[in-house]
Amino acid sequence: MDMKNKFLLTALLGIYSFSLNAQHHEQQYLEPTDPLVQEKLATWQDYKFGLLMHWGAYSQWGVVESWSICPEDEDWCKRRGPHSGSYFNYLDAYNNLQTTFNPTQFEPERWAKAAKNAGMKYMVFTTKHHDGFCMFDSQFSPYTAANPACPNSESTHPDLTKSIFNAFRAQGLWIGAYFSKPDWHHPDYWDPQFPPYDRNPNYDLQKKPEKWESFVRFTHNQILELMTNYGKVDILWLDGGWVQPYTATSPKWGYKPVDQNIRMDELAAQARQLQPGLIVVDRAVEGPNQNYLTPEQSIPDKPLPYPWETCMTMANSWSYVPGDQYKSTATLLKNLCLIVSRGGNFLLNIAPDPQGRWDSIAYQRLDEIGAWMQTNGQAIYNSKPVAPYQITDGDNGSWVFTQVDKSTYAIWIPGAQDKDQVSLDLAQLNANAQRRNWKVKSLNQGNVAIIKHGILDIKLEANPLQTPQVFKLN
């Protein structure tokens, strides 16, 4: 994953912008012009809840995905373990993880059923992260889980991406392919003649334009492989936003940023010839190929004026870490309600372990989320935000709001203090949602809700999980 994004609105000319918090630079959001993309994007905005998975050979070490081989002095790039004393020894050992990666307990069908039962509508899987290790059977790289050098190649599922996509598609979820534009294993990105010095190419692209052109062709070929050989793909989710043309306003990441034009307009057009209506998410790159924006591990205070999705971890890390601490069901549902009440989608990350398993806690969280969604999902899907977006009652909790058709949903999110009675002055809702004669229905039948003189009074049933409680107003 890349740097967090914060977002600002520029009203002039009706064009919206966001700023990368590390760069203090505004970038324009451009709406797609393809009617098929517009239609698909509108459907995606109604889906609200999806699954992200970071998985690769690095899971064997339980380290951060890819970044420990990046020679930058950042906390997320630190190297640990027996090979950490020498960068090049570490890099060799890291690359050799291909020869031991063997997820013999891989169960994509179980993942897909759990995601569907939790109410997820789409998924995004890391087909290739920055380290270049392909979780799909690429014909353009030997550095894959399907190559004979990898024990997984002898399994019944040598092409892990294909097995995952097929399993989730069979459960009715949309398919998203995460793909890293930088590739730190490819000799035309990090030339083995020179040591890498940051996340960017380690050679002068102006001196060796043919080398960069070779990498561009490689990138196009791999993405078009995914668009050709893996069934219907709905989202192409591109990471590594420093791979973009170098301009006066482009973000500057690494010690020596350089122009890295991979001709995204051309690539997106070719991808859509194979996958009509494909949503393209070229993260952090200004222009028409960022069909929605992706604040990372953060939730905006108010709605954003363009399609957006918060990507966030279920545990602390994006990739598998032994003994990682998982967020509570209450926290996950609180985050879902906050995000949806601002008009966004929630992309929740779960990291499989080296054997291809999810932690039992992840299944438990999804089961509990699914039970909540069975009762309350009508307030989540197809919803729009309602001002004032959030009303906070100190440590007691807060109210957030959504609207579906003519119904308004008031969602109580419990706070640190365990309250059994709460209230809401309905006059605080925006004018479009206000009514003289409100009627209320608690989606949880154990709660008692009445409206008197414009005040919604609630007596709450015992709620051991401290999950949000939803009330339908008509």
Image (tube, rainbow, N blue to C red):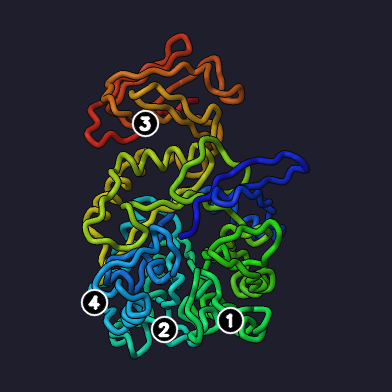
Compared to 153, does 31 lie above or below?
above
Mark 1 = which residue?
215
Q: Residues within 10 Å of mark 3 (few under 14, many from 20)?
A: many
Check disc 4 and give the amino acid type: Thr
Mark 2 = which residue?
143
Numbered label attached to residue 111: none
Query: What percent of the width, then of the height, locates residue 418?
Result: 26, 25
* Residue 103 visible in the displayed image: yes
Q: Residue at x 48, y 29 (%)?
A: 390
Please state if 37 lies on the left or on the right of 406 as rendered: right
Give the mark nearest the N terminus, 1 or 2.
2
* Residue 157 visible in the displayed image: no
Q: Residue at x 63, y 55 (%)?
A: 39
Mark 3 = which residue?
413
Check disc 3 and give the amino acid type: Ile
Callout 4 touching callout 2 (CB < 8 Å):
no
Circle 1: element type: helix
Numbered label attached to residue 104: 4
Give the mark nearest the N terminus, 1 or 4.
4
Query: What percent of the width, then of the height, locates residue 183?
Result: 50, 75
Give the mark nearest the N terminus, 4 or 2.
4
Please state if 465 lies on the left or on the right of 48 as rendered: left
Check disc 2 and give the amino acid type: Tyr
